[in-house]
Amino acid sequence: MEIQFVMQLCREALLLILILSGPPILTSLVVGLIISIFQATTQIQEQTLTFVPKILFVFGILGLLGPWLISQIVIFTSRVFESIPKVIGA
């Protein structure tokens, strides 16, 4: 029983990582794509042009979704701590 429980816990942790990292990564991807299209159409080939908007948008998304992200981490962590006796068999 312990092995299945630990495997389920690891599976949930990996899924949580994917869910929590999704919005910043997708935001960075979309902003980078828009800036790349802008650079291709205007023929401005400045490499540093993509960094500042990406950073601003990613920090904005983290600022907007920060409370939700933290609450998901806290919920998962509390479930892990509550299940410690089940894992060690106490």
Image (spheres, helix red, strand yellow):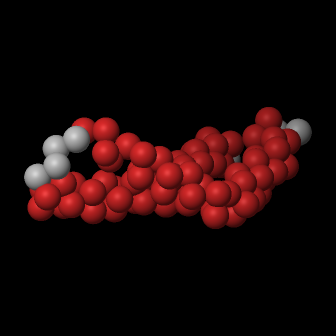
Residue 66 coordinates in the image, percent (x, y):
67, 57
Left or right of 19 on screen, residue 37: left
Q: Which residue is drawn at 48% across and 57% down?
A: 57
Residue 75 quadrant: bottom right
Q: Is residue 85 above or below residue 19?
A: above
Direction top: furthest residue: 88
- In this view, the residue in front, 17 or 30, is 30
Position of 88 compared to 16: left or right? right
Name the residue rendered at 68%, 42% in the picture.
2
Query: Quick one: 18 or 47, which is closer to the camera?
Result: 47
**Residue 76 visible (yes or no):** no
Q: Which residue is drawn at 69% across and 63% down?
A: 68
Q: Where is residue 27 in the image (x, y as percent from the top left)?
A: 42, 60
Looking at the image, residue 67 lies above or below residue 21 = below
Q: So how many labels did they put on this image?
A: 0
- What is the x, y in percent for residue 69? 66, 57
Q: Is residue 80 visible?
A: yes
- Which residue is pictured at 22% across the width and 41% down the height? 46
Relative to 48, residue 78 above or below = below
In front here: 4 or 65?
65
Q: Position of residue 35 (x, y in %)?
A: 27, 57
